[in-house]
Image: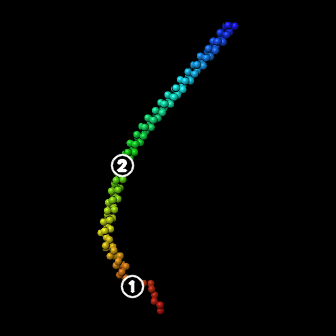
């Protein structure tokens, strides 16, 4: 009977050791998963920073040229406004005279399609 109880004790101890090993393996697995997650997060952050840096460089190149275009367009607009203003001042008096002469100098004429009543 003692050998049976020793066998049972050994089985219980072996089961306890197996349970402890399983617990330890689960803990190691959890630690490894946590470590892998941290590594993946760090890698993602590094990749994101790298892509953002490339994007900013491209954006600077494009926006820089757009900034130059914007300055050129602003300059052209200013020049066009200046030309129109000078043309307005140069032609204003002549145009006013022409307009006033058209309004005030009326020469009455009979329309060519008018037929007098007989």
Disc 1 vs disc 2: Cβ atoms closer than 8 Å? no
Residue 118 pos. (x, y %)? 47, 92
Q: In terms of image quadrants, where is residue 9?
A: top right
Q: Residue 16 appears at what percent x and percent y?
A: 61, 17
The disc placed on residue 65 is 2
Residue 8 sits in quarter = top right
User: Mark 1 highlights which residue?
Assistant: 108
Residue at image location 36% in from the left, 47% down from the top? 64
On screen, residue 111 above or below 50: below
Residue in the picture at 44% in, 84% down: 113
Q: CA distance from mark 1 to mark 2?
A: 63 Å
Instruction: Give the structural element (helix, strand or loop) at label 1.
Output: loop
Q: Residue furthest top?
A: 2
Give the x, y percent position of residue 109.
Answer: 39, 85
User: Is residue 5 placed above or below 60 in the rendered structure?
Assistant: above
Label tally: 2
- Say the numbered circle drawn on residue 87: none
Question: Residue 61: x, y in percent?
Answer: 37, 45
Q: Secondary structure at mark 2?
A: helix
- Residue farthest along the right direction in this orientation: 1
* Disc nearer the start of the sequence (1/2): 2
In the visual, does 93 lie left or right of 1? left
């Amino acid at each position: 009977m003692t050998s049976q109880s020793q066998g049972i004790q050994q089985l219980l101890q072996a089961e306890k050791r197996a349970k402890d090993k399983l617990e330890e393996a689960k803990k190691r697995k959890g630690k490894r998963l946590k470590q892998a997650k941290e590594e993946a997060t760090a890698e993602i952050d590094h990749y994101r920073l790298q892509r953002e840096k490339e994007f900013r460089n491209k954006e600077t190149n494009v926006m820089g040229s757009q900034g130059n275009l914007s300055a050129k367009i602003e300059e052209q607009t200013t020049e066009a406004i200046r030309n129109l203003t000078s043309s307005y001042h140069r032609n204003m008096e002549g145009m006013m005279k022409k307009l006033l002469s058209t309004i005030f100098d009326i020469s009455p004429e009979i329309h060519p399609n008018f037929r007098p009543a007989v």
